[in-house]
Amino acid sequence: MNHVQRRHFLLATGAMLAAPLASFAQKQGKIWRIGFLTPSMPQNPGAPDAYSMAFMREMQVNGHARGVDYVMEIRSADDDFERLPTLANELLRLNVDVLIPVSPIAVGAAYMATKTIPIVCIGAHDPVGFGLAASLARPGGNLTGLATFYADLIPKHLELLKVLVPKVSRVAILGNAKMYRDTTVEKMLFEGAEMLGIRLQLVTIDSIEQLPGAFAAMTREHAGAMIIVADVMFVRERHRIAELALKHRLPSLTADRESVQAGALLSYGEDFVEMFARAAKYVDKIMKGAKPGDLPIEQPTKFHSSINLRTASALKLIIPQELLLRADELIE
């Protein structure tokens, strides 16, 4: 998840369409066990979601049917991030063939748990800078997959807010206090804010129960808008956050499209649906004999923007034409 999540996770329990029988013959009876590790679930367990469907759809395109060629083992820390190392080791005891951690903090737990089982990450934050890979082009170890450079999105988020609310002078930043302290993100935030003449109010919470108090603090400090830092917990609580933002009259910007569909105003970030599909391509290559250390780590190339026009109307905001034309999704 982010910046991931923006940065965002759930694997549906429903079966995909049956794949050709040739797929079964191709694997000669081997059923691959794929372990997913995530800090929390973005929605109710068992419900289909765009991420899991994208992963399974791409697996099917490559000739792999769920329940025939592979099975999924899913472990969620349910927002208790200290459980991630234990859950990673639990997946290893199940003899998973591939480990897929979602979000930077899950990637770190998976990397600490094994240096031999292939890891296909979704949302590794600066993997070279954090010592997870020798280089993006040739990682060299057991980790590959999709990187995220959420800090690089920060200037764009601030710029979009300034276009959306030209007179905004104070912006609240909602973050998860349980996540590791990302000094790069904070540095980019304050540098970008200074260039635009914006003052920042950092508001971090330890649990969702603190959300009302966090929004009350933003109102007391006269925040004119807010940025929701990419985090799986915030995606899961997106409906409640959107309601609170509207109640406190705060235009909200996030990295994930799901939050905008739930009522946030604007999103701009990596397309995590696409990232889950790309992760399936990595798994396919590993199933066919590729070594993860030889597979280049991909940087985000596709970004998605959404605007909730209903929320804009409720906030009495007029969306500039330039934002409307650049949006991938307009929710009316």
Image (spheres, rainbow, N blue to C red):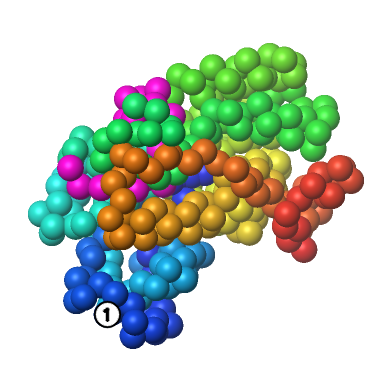
Quarter of the C terminus within the rendering: bottom right
Q: Residue at x 76, y 58 (%)?
A: 330
Q: Main secondary structure of the magenta part?
A: loop
Q: Position of residue 124 (x, y in %)?
A: 40, 38
Q: Residue at x 86, y 42 (%)?
A: 322
Relative side of 12 to 81, left or right: right
Query: Is residue 261 shown above or below 81?
Result: below
Q: Residue at x 73, y 29 (%)?
A: 159
Amino acid carrying label 1: it is: Ala
Give yes or no for residue 131 being in the magenta stretch: yes
Instruction: Say which of 85 and 171 sits in front.
Output: 85
Q: Secondary structure under badge 1?
A: helix
The quadrant holding residue 45 is: bottom left
Q: What residue is disc 1 on?
A: 25
Q: Position of residue 323 (x, y in %)?
A: 81, 44
Relative side of 318 to 149, left or right: right
Residue stretch rendered in magenta on the structure:
116-133
Residue 61 can be seen in this image: yes
Q: Residue at x 70, y 52 (%)?
A: 306
Instruction: Say which of 77 and 93 sits in front.
Output: 93
